[in-house]
Amino acid sequence: MTETFTSSASRLDPAGTGAGAATGGRVRNAALPLFVVCAVQFLDAMDIATMGPALPQIQRELGMTPDALQWVVSAYTLGFGSTLLLGGRLADLFDRKNRMSGLRGTGNARRG
């Protein structure tokens, strides 16, 4: 039983033209979604973590008990998670090109 092992460069460029190695081929195309997913995960964790420092002020201003304050954290996390689920479902319903053009439009609108 003989197995043939191929290098990653030959898998990216099956024709052997060398074009995949020069441009990064599929590896380059896979780097952007990986970066976006990592950035979103970081922002998600940071968003939930920023609730901690705000809790004492929320408790003072609204006169809440510690038990009621836990409901604030739970409601915030539940709402945030719900919007993530909704965004994922909308992404499943619409094709990739429409989503990416929507992201570009949002980015252009933020730049002003």
Image (spheres, grey):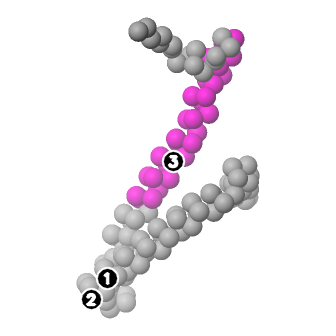
Number of labelled discs? 3
Secondary structure of the residue carrying tag 3 is helix
Secondary structure of the residue carrying tag 1 is helix
Residue of label 3: 37
Residue of label 2: 65
Q: Check whether the beta carbons of the residues at disc 2 and disc 1 lie within 8 A of each other.
A: yes
Q: Quadrant of residue 90?
A: bottom right
Where is residue 107? Give x, y as percent. Answer: 68, 54
Q: Which residues are magenta?
A: 17-46
Q: Is residue 104 visible?
A: no
In whole angstroms, how far apart are the C-alphas of marks 3 and 1? 31 Å
Residue 46 is left or right of residue 104, and the answer is: left
Amino acid on which the number 2 mark rests in the picture: Thr
Secondary structure of the residue carrying tag 2 is loop
- In the picture as drawn, the residue positioned furthest to the front comes out as 1
Where is residue 53? Give x, y as percent. Answer: 33, 70
- In the picture as drawn, the residue positioned furthest to the top comes out as 2
Amino acid on which the number 1 mark rests in the picture: Leu
For the stretch drawn in magenta, what is the main secondary structure?
Answer: helix
In whole angstroms, how far apart are the C-alphas of marks 3 and 2? 37 Å
The mark that comes first in sequence, 3 or 2, is 3
Q: Is residue 9 visible?
A: yes
Q: Which mark is residue 96?
A: none
Residue 57 is left or right of residue 21, and the answer is: left
Residue of label 1: 69
In whole angstroms, how far apart are the C-alphas of marks 2 and 1? 6 Å
Determine whether 39 is above or below 87 in the image.
above
> Magenta stretch containing residue 81, yes or no?
no
Of 92 and 25, the residue lying toward us: 92
Determine whether 84 is above or below 41 in the image.
below
Where is residue 9? Give x, y as percent. Answer: 56, 16
